[in-house]
Image (tube, helix red, strand yellow):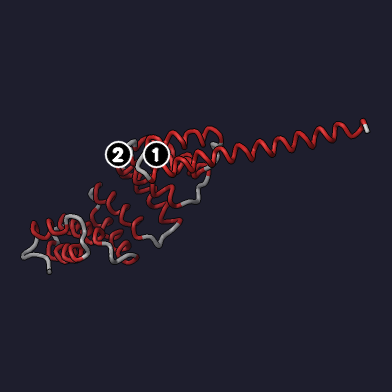
Amino acid sequence: MKKNIPMNRAILFLSLMILGFFLCAQTAGKHAANGFSLATQGKYAEAVEEYDKAIRINRNNARFHYYRGICLFELGEYGESVQSYSYAILIESGNHLYYWNRGKSYASMDFHEDAIDDFTDAIRLKDDTGEYFYYRGISKAALGDHVWAIEDFDKAIERENRVGDYYRSRGECLVALGKVNQACQDFQLAAERSAFNANYFLKKHCQGNPKK
């Protein structure tokens, strides 16, 4: 019987380890769930605190870093949100959402070259989402690359042709290139889709008013 004591202790130790991991995972998940609930209520600062607690328990969960990054973005803490998204990417490099959101943070800080790199990675992982091409086009336009921006807006429209913002932004680039007549067609399409500021651009650059 004495020979079995070391084996029994080993089994007990292993069982306690498994139980400890399980309890830690449960606790981290609880904090993350609290963070998600707070974020849906617009309480982003409190949500960040909950995700911080979850990450202290389990720093290898990419989703914790990702959702923390979203909350920081909503708080206007773009630099910190980039760090959170970067941690998420280090842990799970194949998720297009991480690159897209980090790209938005870079763009919000006017780091458009970095943003373009991230949007490109998001497109590489998921090329059927018009919004990814749209955001990359916005950053290209911000750098003055209107021709290349138009190509991205074209691709965005090919994938989601009901989004008015895509037409309006393409129209703005066409104006920058001196192609006002083409731009007015885009502003008209944007207005028909209730895009923000579409009517303003119609009145500024085009003859007449949008169709009723």
Label placed on residue 82: 1
Please report the residue visible at 28 percent of the width from the left and 41 percent of the height from the top: 110
The reply to whether the C-beta atoms of the residues labelled 2 and 1 are less than 8 Å apart is yes
Q: Quadrant of the C terminus?
A: bottom left
SS at mark 1 in the image = helix
Mark 1, Cα crowd under 10 Å, few <14 / some 14-19 / many 20+, is: many
Please report the residue visible at 44 percent of the width from the left and 33 percent of the height from the top: 49
User: What is the C-alpha distance between the residues marked 2 and 1?
Assistant: 10 Å
The percent position of residue 75, horizontal first and vertical second, equals: 33, 38
Left or right of 95? Residue 20 is right
The percent position of residue 83, horizontal first and vertical second, equals: 42, 36
Mark 2, Cα crowd under 10 Å, few <14 / some 14-19 / many 20+, is: some
Q: Is residue 85 in view from this perspective?
A: no
Determine which residue is flagged by label 2. 109
Up-down: is 165 above or below 100? below
Q: How many marks?
A: 2
